[in-house]
Image: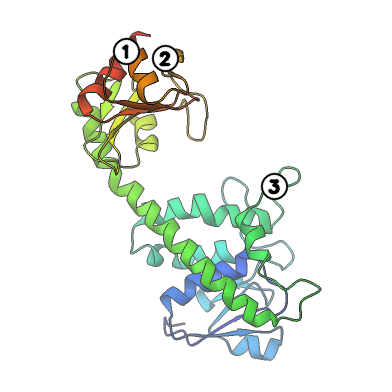
Amino acid sequence: MTDKIQVIATHNGNFHADDVFAVAALKQLFTSAKIIRTRDLDVIAQADLVLDVGGLYDADTGRFDHHQRGGAGARENGIPFSSFGLMWQKYGLKLCSGDQEVADSVDKNLVSAIDAIDCGHVDGPLTGVSLSQTISMFNPTWEEDNNFDDCFEEAVIFASRVLTRFIAAAQGGVNAKSIVAEAIEKADDPRVIVLEQFTPWKTTVLKLSQDALFMLYPAQTGEWRIQTVPVELGSFEDRKKLPAPWAGLSGKELQDVTGLDDAIFCHNGLFIAGCKSFENTLKMAKMALEY
């Protein structure tokens, strides 16, 4: 099999996030490839790549189905592969410009989540709106007379944009690691880390620093922010909250409480606050340490 992919086949009719995202990803690599949606086995056999149909997983021959008896394997964490995950194993690195760390990040945060839902590898009923559900909403309802293939194309366009942003976010996170690590190393007080520009910091700080309590960084508006460090990724619990008397205050009220003439706001959740100047935001950090 060569990388000259001319025809990509997937099933027709109702579609899900795994086949939509797999097609969206491959269209970024093989822009001129024709997409055929069918269950005709003769047509499928002639395709260069086959996704989510055909009853076969063989990456070497471009077959990426997971519906056959026994499935198509699973990750070390137990999440089975859907067609998206199978495709990502072969082409994810190329889609991420050869950066394995970026490819792994996208797999963890996007691909495996779609695989899990598609394969029913979830605990209890899903709550809220998932990305998989959003893709499914592109299917015509029973009251609509829309063409499934046209709706599929709309979903692929949407998924392509989402995938692009996941890759960009992962790349940004990887590029930020050295900047954050250097800021940790240069900190005058290991409890207060100052970033000269905002970069994603949580993963690196939680990995490299047990002491960091507050992060200081400039906002896009030129003002400065102080933000608490959570106990772990995704947690609403912080290593140390900002002072309770600041909660929900802004403008003059916060200025009166802090004595800082350019204090702007403090979130009611006590995880973020700010001043116009770096100097006074640093003073906020010192007050918070002592509180």
CB under 8 Å between discs 2 and 3: no
Question: In the rendered image, which residue does mark 3 sit on?
Answer: 122
Question: In the rendered image, which residue does mark 2 sit on?
Answer: 243
The local crowd at label 3, few if under 14, some if 14 to 19, many if 20 or more residues have their Cα within 10 Å, is few
Q: Is residue 112 visible?
A: yes
- Distance Cα–Cα, label 2 vs label 1: 8 Å
Residue 108 higher or lower than 195, as above or below: below
**Residue drawn at (28%, 22%) of the image:** 192
**Residue drawn at (51%, 24%) of the image:** 237
Disc 2 marks a residue whose amino acid type is Pro
Task: Name the spot of residue 90 as percent of width and height, x first.
Answer: 47, 67
The residue mark sitting in front, 2 or 3, is 2
Mark closest to the chain's N terminus, 2 or 3: 3
The local crowd at label 2, few if under 14, some if 14 to 19, many if 20 or more residues have their Cα within 10 Å, is some
Quarter holding the C terminus is top left
Disc 1 marks a residue whose amino acid type is Met
- Distance Cα–Cα, label 2 vs label 3: 39 Å
**Closest to the observer, 57 or 287:** 287
Task: Name the spot of residue 196 as percent of width and height, x first.
Answer: 21, 37
Task: Name the spot of residue 141 as percent of width and height, x first.
Answer: 76, 71
Give the secondary structure at mark 1: helix
Residue 274 higher or lower than 13, as above or below: above
Judge from the rendering whether residue 260 lies leftward or rightward of residue 24; answer left or right: left
Residue 287: assigned label: 1
Task: Name the spot of residue 47 as percent of width and height, x first.
Answer: 57, 86
CB under 8 Å between discs 2 and 1: yes
